[in-house]
Structures are given as C-alpha cells and as structure tokens.
Amino acid sequence: MRNGFRVYDSDTHVMPTAEVLERYVDPDFRPRLAELEPYRVPIRQSAEHSGGGQAYRVNTKYYRRILGEAAPREDHSGRESNWRGSKLPRPGVQDDQAENRVKDMDDEGTDVHFLIPSSWVGTVGLADPTLEVGLSRAYHRHMADFCGQFPNRLKGLIRAPARDVDGRAVARRAAPRTLHPRSRHG
C-alpha cells in the first residue's frame, strides 16, 4: 500500500520454464512432449529471468526497433535492453518461487500482481493446436500452485487457446478457481 492506496500491477509477466510446465502436464499428454522437443531453447540470464533451463519457442518474432532511432536494427533482438530498475528481481520469480515474487512486491510497495504468461505462449505457431492446449492445461495447474501460495497477492489469467474452440471451453471449465475467470489470453 502506498499513500493509502492499494497498488495493483496488471502487466507483470510470468515465464515458467519448460521444466516447470512439464511437471504439470496431464499424464496422457506426457508422451507428446517429444513432439515439442525441437522447440526447446536455452533461457539466457537476464533481468527478467535468472537463466538456466529451457523455454518453448515457435516462430520467434524480434522487435528490431529501438526507441529514439529512426530505423530498425536488423541485428537487434529486443532482448538487449538495459535494466532500468534499482534492484534486480530475486531468483525464480518467473518460474516457481512465489515467495520470492511476493518479497519483491513488498520491496516495490505492490499489493497485487496480475500475472500474464510470456515465452511459451509462442506455441500458437504450431500446426497442431492440441499441443498448445496441453501446455495451457499444464500452465493452469502450475499457476494454481504458484498463485495459491499467496491467493490475495498473486492472480493469474485463464490461457484459452483460440484455435481450438472445444479445447478453449475445456480450458476455461478446467481452470482452477484461483485463476481469474474474466481474463483470457489466447
């Protein structure tokens, strides 16, 4: 709370690694993880992520523009930006360390984080939408555990894949109650 106001951050991201998501996949989906193997890439250390592990990436798009420059830079990936905060996030706040995220929130004076998925949602580029649905279901279970540790502080959204109408309906019905039913991503 700051100056008597509750502070909500509605644009904070969570990027669970492939290893974290795989802990939560449905047993009948587990054999299909082999189909996703070509899309696993190493995660480099950055201000947002402590590094290590892998992420799922399909058809990655790079933002070549740099604020203040007239033309895009073909060699710019968008990931070389300089950290502007006064303190780097604690380890694991993007993966499975909910306690560290809440400690960072306390340092910032933030009461609630509304978490938006990043990274692995790039699976929308896969030809088979059931792979996206399988990862979305794993993401929901992971977020239920992550947010469930601090249900008044951490909120997640329902990741409902748009390319699979039946899967979207199932994702919404199956999403844990700790996720925000009025917020959809996909």
Image: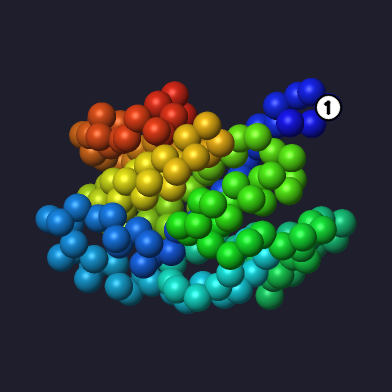
Regarding residue 64, the answer to whether it shows in the image is: no
Q: Is residue 134 left or right of residue 41?
A: left
Direction from residue 166 to residue 139 in the image, left or right: right
Q: How many marks?
A: 1
Check disc 1: other Cα within 10 Å, few if <14, some if 14-19, many if 20+: few
Q: Is residue 42 visible?
A: yes
Residue at point 25% right, 34% down?
174
Does 73 sit above or below residue 99?
Answer: below
Q: Which residue is mark 1?
A: 3
Figure check: 8 above or below 136: above
Q: Position of residue 71 (x, y in %)?
A: 80, 62
Quadrant that contains the C terminus? top left
Compared to residue 53, the image places residue 4 above or below, namely above
Snapshot colouring: rainbow
Q: Quadrant of residue 120?
A: bottom left
Q: State which quarter of the image contains the N terminus.
A: top right
Query: Where is residue 163 shown, x and y percent of the image?
Result: 31, 41
Question: Where in the figure is residue 83, as x and y percent of width and height?
Answer: 76, 63
Along the viewing direction, whichever of 116 and 123 lies nearer the viewer = 116
Residue 149 appears in which quarter of the rendering?
A: top left
Give the left or right position of residue 21, taking residue 52 as reference: left
Helix, strand or loop at label 1? It is: loop
Q: Position of residue 135 (x, y in %)?
A: 31, 53
Report the amino acid beneath label 1. Answer: Asn
